[in-house]
Amino acid sequence: LQPLPALSLPTEGLYGVNASLEQYSSDKDLYHALGALREAGLHWVRQHFPWEAIEPQHGVYEWEPWDRLVEAVTSQGLELIAVLDSAPAWARSPADQDNPFAPPRFVTTYGLFVRAFASHYAEQITCYEVWDQPNIFPHWGQGPVDPAAYVRLLAVASRELRSADPDAIVLSAGLAPNTEPGGRNMSEVLFLQGMYRAGAKGLFDVLSAKPYGFWTGLEDRRV
């Protein structure tokens, strides 16, 4: 392999980190963690906002724990990428009652959730990632993964996010790297091709990618 070219790029505001800020029960620990991120030169915080925790009952939203996190992040000059996934039990199909990672039975229920989320946080969050890893089990439930079904979810979510928050930047779901042809797991390349065949073009602003392999780091160019 030829050496990668050296690029001179600005670093301010480019880099971020995946976080699980809900683990910090005390404000002291939460702000300490955020301060460490800021001091490391990081800017973006990719945080899951689980639908099942925010809307445990249909139409009943529990914002308070998440308001605390959002306020803490934004007060430190950091920006959030909100990953909106994990359907609540009431919205899942009967076959997926024990799988919180499964998608909703009806995409309209997810649309109502993302509309409520974007309306609630429009002044604090701009970037919304629609689901996570829909190309692998268990993130698409018990059945086979389905790019066209994901696009239907993406289409509803994109419309509702942009309606509730005109400044919304919509990210497609980060796809898990693998080489399988289909079934419960599908190569991210095949899945992305299936998304475009199903009409995904124009439904999102940013394509999310996960540059890791199974047993190697992201510096391994074979990945």
Image (cartoon, helix red, strand yellow):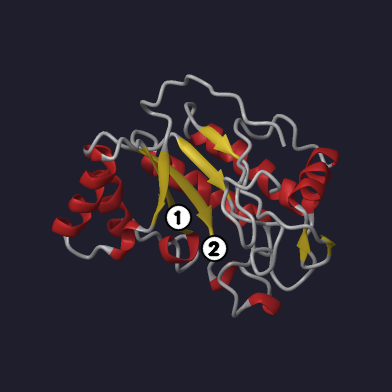
How crowded is the residue under tag 1: few (<14 C-alpha within 10 Å), some, or many (20+)?
many
Judge left or right: residue 138 versus residue 197: left
Residue at horizontal 66 percent and vertical 43 percent from the top: 221
Q: Nearer the viewer, mark 1 or mark 2?
A: 1
Residue that badge 1 annotates: 48
Residue 86: percent from the left, percent from the top? 54, 63
Residue 17: percent from the left, percent from the top? 41, 46
**In the rendered view of the protein, which quadrant contains the N terminus?**
top right
Looking at the rendering, which quadrant does residue 26 occupy? bottom left
Amino acid found under the numbered disc labelled 2: Ser
State the residue lying farthest toward the left.
28
The reply to whether callout 1 and callout 2 are in contact (CB within 8 Å) is yes
Earlier-in-chain disc, 1 versus 2: 1
Question: The residue tagged with tag 2: helix, strand or loop?
Answer: loop
Residue at horizontal 53 percent and vertical 68 percent from the top: 88
Residue that badge 2 annotates: 86
